[in-house]
Amino acid sequence: MHFAVMAAEAIDWLAVRPTGTYLEATAGLGGHTGEIARRLTTGRVIANDRDAESLEMARRNTAAWADRICFHQGAFSQLAAALPACGAEQVNGLLADLGVSRYQLTEPDRGFSFMAEGPLDMRMDRSTGITAADLVNQYAEKAIADLIYQLGEERRARKIARAIVRARPIRSTLHLAGLVERAVPRTSHLHPATRTFMALRMFVNDEQGELDRLLEIGPELLASGGRMVVISFMSLEDRKVKQRFRGLAQEGRAAILTKHPLTPTEQETGLNPASRSAKLRALEMR
């Protein structure tokens, strides 16, 4: 089952108006997009995602409101192109859920998961860029260790990188997961390969760079009084959002609406444990 994380809170803080124009920067499978669209009359929601396969599923999941939704494929760095493509100049609200979709994590063919056999791909947009296989089989040991340590916050990164280089060629997700587990045995409830897979995914998709671009471009797309709502799942991401929002407030360009980040209710985390680490921040442009 697909859950749109903190959907009620996100919609409340967006302050959706029936005639407004909204941008869902991470449409995923269409959960938040549908929640916005069903509240519109003459308004429009631009549903953007870099993953063409997710967008197609979002299109099917939101078919009941098709006349209110314009779909656009692109990374955060291409968001400015989404507005004119959908006949808009500015938007009244922008929502970005930075979590990886359950579809991507559970579809073996995408290569995100260490729980099933699949190709080491991990690209959110499979039409461009390097794959995780390119990374683990071609990059220098130090480069691999650095990115696993910095992006995955994995303190055993050097040992893992050494094991990867010695085992080349790495053939699949389970091959990689197995060698990581042998190199660094389990010390907690987390699978030993969890942080390594996360780091590789973040690097392959330039997730931190794209987040920087979202935080730079996003406020410029908002009309006066428009709101930006970001749901993050990692401390590194939340810190970037917090700093950018604070900077805009100090410049007098925006007002921070959430003094402290909002977190999911106990009821939501009970239904969807993956939402447990979510943090929501919102601001309003002046």
Image (cartoon, grey):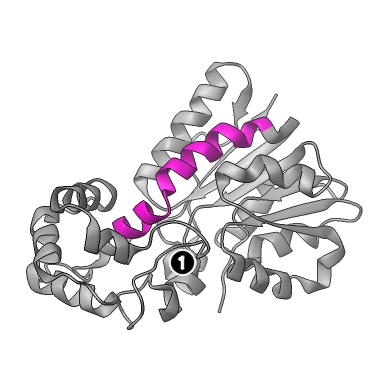
Which quadrant would residue 121 be assigned to in this image?
bottom left
Locate residue 148 relative to residue 70 in the image: left or right: left
Q: What residue is at 33 percent from the left and 82 percent from the top?
A: 116
Relative image position of residue 55 (x, y in whole percent): 64, 66
Q: Is mark 1 on a helix, strand or loop?
A: helix
| Crowd tier of the residue under label 1, counting other residues whose Cα lies within 10 Å: few below 14, some 14–19, many 20 or above | some
Q: Residue furthest right?
A: 42
Q: Name the residue under label 1.
A: 269
Locate residue 272 relative to residue 254 in the image: left or right: left
Give the amino acid type for the residue marked by disc 1 in the picture.
Answer: Thr
The correct choice, above or below, for 33 with respect to 107 in the image is above
Relative image position of residue 189 (x, y in whole percent): 21, 70
Q: Is residue 235 magenta?
A: no
Which quadrant of the figure contains the N terminus?
bottom right
Q: Residue furthest top?
A: 251
Residue closer to the observer: 213 or 143: 143
Q: What residue is at 16 percent from the left and 67 percent from the top?
A: 188
The correct choice, above or below, for 199 with respect to 102 in the image is above
Which quadrant of the figure contains the C terminus?
top right
Q: What residue is at 55 percent from the left and 32 percent from the top?
A: 216
Q: Does the magenta stretch include residue 219?
A: yes
Relative image position of residue 161 (x, y in whole percent): 14, 58
Relative image position of residue 28 (x, y in whole percent): 59, 64
Q: Give the range drawn in magenta.
A: 199-220
Locate residue 159 relative to residue 108 in the image: left or right: left
Predominant secondary structure in magenta?
helix
Q: How many labels does the image show?
A: 1
